[in-house]
Image: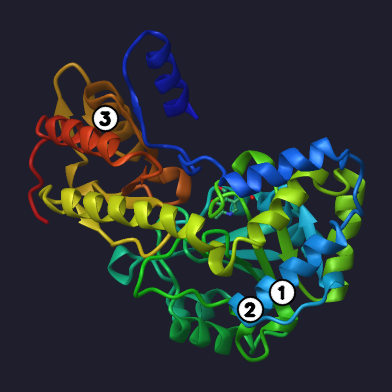
Amino acid sequence: MAITDHATALVQAGVPVIRLAAGEPDFDTPAAIAEAGISAIRQGYTRYTPNAGTLELRKAICHKLREENGLSYTPDQILVSNGAKQSCMQAVLAVCSPGDEVLVPAPYWVSYPEMARLADATPVILPTDISDNFLLRPESLAAKLNEKSRVLILCSPSNPTGSVYPKELLEEIADIVRKHPRLLVLCDEMYEHIIYPPAKHTSFASLPGMWERTFTVNGFSKAFAMTGWRLGYLACPNQFLAACAKIQSQITSGACSISQKAGLAALNLGFAGGEAVATMVKAFQERRDFLVKSFRELPGVKISEPQGAFYLFVDFSSYYGSEVEGFGIVKDSESLCRFLLDKAQVALVPGDAFGDDKCVRISYAASLSTLQAAVEKIKEAMVLLESPVSV
Ligand SMILES: Cc1ncc(COP(=O)(O)O)c(C=O)c1O
């Protein structure tokens, strides 16, 4: 937040800051989806919908989950919410009691530990390493499990690292989960469609014995460039769904009627969002390739090539400790981001916010030419820092 505030102040003062901190696509919502929303308004489709979402949308979600994910759900096992953030929060609230532990691999999406705290549960952070592509080692999970362990949160493709869990690794994780009857898994599949070959998405609930204990969360914000429409959903067994629906019915009720019509149009675009989504994913992949190549040229920088989402999580820690005249010491991810904002006029997010202070998150939800300008400026600024001693 401090970096964002600082960036905003600079923009207001007329400084041309390049913002690569956003967690949303830079594309417009595809026309067919937007038209469905407009026509919903024109047709007066502007009233409350059922709390769980319209039946036509929940049926379409079941169809999507069956065709694309190999998952079998009925409409009464789907809860449509005002964004996937609400879906995640409600799942955690529904099943956690005070003292329960929520296991969160780091780097994590910023909201997960806070969701655990909001539910009076305790977040237990499971660090991962860039040399493992930020993927959770099954033994690290096994070492932290106990009778208080209630929810394991997996996010694949990941925000902030872009890592994608291979099926074999998920199977190893499932073998451990199976030994703990009380343990549930919240699988955040928000970036499912934004994935780069040869990586493949596997839904955790599709693994043997995992359907019964998995909350599958997905939504429309990222793949369909619909962040402002606020539409996400959760699929899970009936008893958990009933608890989540009860929470939703008291805090927000059903999601926006217009957005649900638009969501239906999104699912009708075809397998994995059809051409419209494929075009955006192709652009993201080009940008990923450009950024990975560019940052690999910087000495002392460590990168795990993202396999999905639209973020690059770069380890700049070998530069920490450098002193810059007129700025001070770059000692952590926060000061590095302040330094890059001051000297390169590029706004990034400190890794500290995601539970890894060695890194900085760069969002490539920006045009290739914007990214080229940003890289040039970052490289110029990095020269001011002392060259890393060892790589
Ligand atoms: C990993 C992850 N899950 C969920 C969400 C929430 O998405 P929504 O816009 O549907 O609430 C985000 C948004 O940043 C995200 O990055």
Q: Residue at x 47, y 83 (%)?
A: 167
Residue behind label 1 places its C-beta within 8 angstroms of ligand 1: no
Asked which secondary structure carries label 1, the reply is: helix
- Vertical placement of residue 339 versus 24, above or below: above
Q: Residue at x 32, y 33 (%)?
A: 337
Q: Nearer the viewer, mark 3 or mark 1?
A: 1
Q: Residue at x 43, y 79 (%)?
A: 166
The quarter of the image holding the C terminus is bottom left
How far from the left and from the top, in percent, is residue 145? Answer: 59, 77
The residue that disc 1 covers is 63
Mark closer to the chain start, 3 or 1: 1
Q: Amino acid at mark 1?
A: His
The residue that disc 2 covers is 67
Q: Nearer the viewer, residue 117 or 366?
A: 366
Asked which secondary structure carries label 3, the reply is: helix
Q: CA distance from mark 3 to mark 2?
A: 45 Å
Q: Is residue 97 something that shows in the picture?
A: no
The residue that disc 3 covers is 340
How far from the left and from the top, in percent, is residue 354? Answer: 46, 49
Q: Is residue 337 something that shows in the picture?
A: yes
391 left or right, relative to 213? left
- Vertical placement of residue 92 versus 342, above or below: below
Q: Nearer the viewer, residue 240 or 120?
A: 240
